Image (cartoon, rainbow, N blue to C red):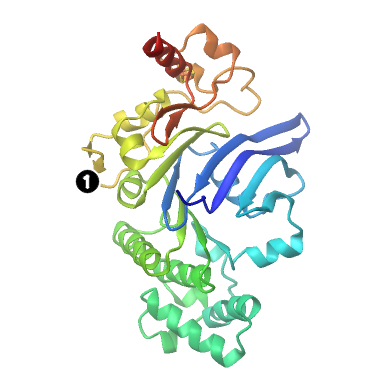
Amino acid sequence: MAEPLLRVEDLRVEFRTRKGAAMVLNGVDFHLNAGETLCVVGESGCGKSMTALALLRLVPTPPGRISGGRVLYGDEDLAQATEARMREVRGNRISMIFQEPMTSLNPVYTVGDQIGETLRLHSGLDATAARERTIEMLRQVGIPAPERRVDDYPHQLSGGMRQRVMIAMALACRPDILIADEPTTALDVTVQAQIFDLLRELQRDKGTAIMLITHDMGAVAEMADRVIVMYAGRVIEQGSTAQVLGSPRHPYTRGLIACLPELGSSQLHERADLPEIPGVVPSIWELGQGCAFRERCAYAIERCAAEVPGMIEVGDGHAAACWLLVDSKEAAQA
Ligand code: SF4
């Protein structure tokens, strides 16, 4: 089996606050294979976006910092790479697109200038070649009349067009990995579907691995090869889309999926946002010992308050972090 493109091991991020150090990521482990789409799901504040920022070493420092773990891109640990090396990696080998493109596009430069600059910086193209490539990229992401649109400023484009420009910029240097953090949340449903179609098409053509952070379970069912579920700064379940959506093993994942009436035979037929599970994600100050989900979990046992469960393998590539699985595994082996 081919080595994963990216391996994240025990990744930890802490923020210094007046109350002390707050662990925002608490030992995150997962991998991303070449050419696949990995969806990352979980409620707000579970650490999805912080994981993405940490991979690219964009955690706001101070007050935040990566306090442990490794981000292995091939044999290279990006958590230890120099800032100069990270500037080469960002946008060139690993790109990121955000929910609201206006926060990433500079309003005083044309879209052509901005994509062209990425190309000149990372691909060494001269101004004429960069402009030609930019027009080609705009065409590939479905911008009509790209020869004209290349000279538009961001405010002259619709939200959907701006997100297409961001995708063009992110893919301009043919990165190995595209991290997309809620890329369609600010867009209407029709445009969302178009953007997901576009990402799938570009992935097919270019073989880019996509790490898609999303609240949209329809997008998970449609896009994902594999899924990781995060809760309180940890990965609590991971597996193929069929495994996680079809036979979820962690009570949190089960709760998410049980709230989705559209889910049938592991496919969601309509778009649905991440449903709510009663209770709230505990604040990082309330985590203490034990399983972070215990206050909301109908199955909690004594051990859940005392020790954090590790990931238990429950199938080929399918694992979840819950003490009940240890007990059922021991019972099965007895
Ligand atoms: Fe619930 Fe305990 Fe499993 Fe946590 S470890 S999900 S509290 S049963």
Q: Is residue 300 visible to the viewer in this orientation of the structure?
A: yes
CA neighbours of label 1 inside 10 A, class few (<14), some (14 to 19), many (20+): some
Position in image of residue 177 (x %, y %): 51, 59
| Nearer to us in this view, 1 or 117 | 1
| Nearer to us in this view, 53 or 330 | 330
Does 20 sit above or below residue 124?
A: above
Residue occupying the point 52% across, 7% down: 302
Q: Residue furthest bottom?
A: 128
Residue occupying the point 57% across, 46% down: 7
| Residue denoted by label 1 | 269
Does 67 sit above or below residue 133?
A: above
Does 208 sit above or below residue 7?
A: below
| The C terminus, quarter of image | top left
Report the amino acid beneath label 1: His
Question: In the drawing, does residue 125 fall left or right of residue 325?
Answer: right
How many numbered marks have been drawn onto this rendered protein structure?
1
Position in image of residue 230 (x %, y %): 50, 36
Name the quadrant containing residue 319: top left
Question: In the drawing, does residue 171 fall left or right of residue 59?
Answer: left
SS of the residue at dot 1? loop
Residue occupying the point 42% across, 36% down: 317
Position in image of residue 105 (x %, y %): 56, 69
Q: Is residue 42 visible to the viewer in this orientation of the structure?
A: no
| Nearer to us in this view, 189 or 333 | 333
Residue occupying the point 53% across, 82% down: 112
Position in image of residue 257 (x %, y %): 32, 32
Q: Residue furthest front?
A: 1
Name the quadrant containing residue 69: top right
- Mark 1 CB in 8 Å range of ligand 1? no
